[in-house]
Amino acid sequence: MASCTTYEGMTPFSSSAPQVIFALATGAGRAAIAIMRASGPGSAELLKSLCGSLPAPRRASLRSLRHQDEVLDHAVVLWLPGPKSYTGEDGFELHLHAGPAVITRVADALTDLDARPAEPGEFTKRAVQKGRLDLLQAEAIADLVDSETESQRKQALQQADGALSRLYDGWAQRLRLVLAHQEALIDFPDEDLPPEVEETLLAEMSALHREMSAHLQDNRGELMRQGLTVVIAGSPNVGKSSLLNALSGYDAAIVTHRAGTTRDAIAVDWVLNGVRLRLIDTAGLRETEDEIEAEGIRRALFHVKQADVILHLIGPDEATDALSDNEIAVRTKIDIASAPPNMLGISTQTGDGLSELRTVLTGRVSALTASAGVPPLTRARHRAGIQEAVTHLDRAQTATWPELRGEELRLSMQALGRLTGRVDVESLLDAIFGQFCIGK
């Protein structure tokens, strides 16, 4: 795990001794093994009470768990002394038989021994408090647990390994050097400081502003974490619902020969090349006096505006309009009339062209989510923090007084520090860790 150094002036965490906490770390449902984990000062005494003695550190040991002269279970026990543990505290794991009665009885015994059930995210929160993780890594642990696709897993693992933390820490360290130069200009105004000091300061401020601004323009991380929205749009009866069913692999939408069958947006989740997509079938776009159909068209236009990719379906008798950058033109019903040259054509009746459509869509999705070397930001909190840092850099570059420039540089550095938890972290913890599952 990465260590968590702090800047001078960082508000310390509470020093009061925390209670031993415990939680089931495995999911509910019928299984052979259930893992109960515990952490906190007093874990050694509690484990000795259950087992009679402590096993060797980080060595699996088969023990009989006892409480009040009763055998609770025969379990594999792991003793995990701090600071080399997930939380940085003393802790242990009990690998129990997964019967509900066993789990409940062991939990009751732990409560009798003055441990308490953990709150959501409390294990990871303690890891942050002990410097085992920073906030960005902690958020990545939550993303890793929630990951459903290969791209989400890779991104969360990269962030958990500290890639984003290193980027933001690097910017903060460079800002500290800029601020040091600025302080020298403030403290020694009458000294003959080399002109290179001011030139270096301004050049580095400009470079940092440029890098952070480019980072804000990169939405790859948010797209991979949340998934891309792909909207199927076009005129009525052009084959939108048929395409949704063909791509998703099941009859998600009703298909008839009657125009205007789809009155509302129908969404299905689909994974393409390791990236989560949300496919949305929409009402056909046309002028109508029907109140219900008009509302469906209004919703269709809303989804089109929000889409990352639009599959614009065009029927055999329709002309091709100018396309926006996020649209892919698709000629439908090529079993009736072939597609023009240089246009993608499909038939949901015969399956012709569907493989080519998947290939084109895969290329578009890959272009939107492809790695560019620099770790992308993944959450709205990160975007807001970087935006705040850039805003203060803007003000620093236009400040007329050296003292004002120095203050804006400090505020920019603090905005970066709040992202990783180096400064003003306590107020962020409950909001961040409240989203975690119990036992993580």
Image: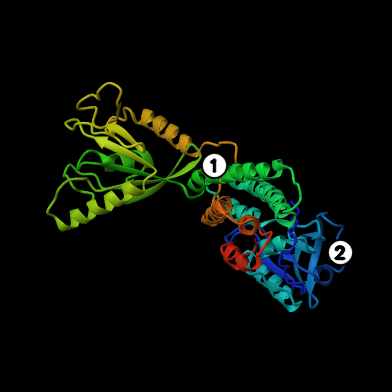
Badge 1 is on which residue? 151
Crowd tier of the residue under label 1, counting other residues whose Cα lies within 10 Å: few below 14, some 14–19, many 20 or above: many
Q: Residue at x 19, y 27 (%)?
A: 336
Residue kind at label 1, given as amino acid type: Ser
Residue kind at label 2, given as amino acid type: Leu
Picture quadrant where residue 279 is located: top left
Badge 2 is on which residue? 54
Q: Nearer the viewer, residue 326 or 171?
A: 171
Q: Nearer the viewer, residue 194 or 432?
A: 194
Colour setting: rainbow
Location of residue 101 with respect to 397 vertically, above or below: below
Crowd tier of the residue under label 2, counting other residues whose Cα lies within 10 Å: few below 14, some 14–19, many 20 or above: some
Query: Quick check: can you spot residue 364?
Result: yes
N-terminal of the pair, mark 2 or mark 1, is 2
Query: Quick check: can you spot residue 249?
Result: no
Residue at far top of view: 341
Nearer the camera: disc 2 or disc 1: 1
Q: What element does badge 2 sit on?
A: loop
**Could you tell me residue 3's position as x and y percent?**
76, 53
Picture quadrant where residue 374 is located: top right
**Could you tell me residue 189's position as x and y percent?**
72, 54
Which label was assigned to residue 106? none
Viewport quadrant of the C terminus? bottom right
**Could you tell me residue 250's position as x and y percent?**
35, 44
Q: What element does badge 1 sit on?
A: helix
| Image marks 2 and 1: residues in contact by CB distance under 8 Å | no
Q: Nearer the viewer, residue 122 or 101?
A: 122
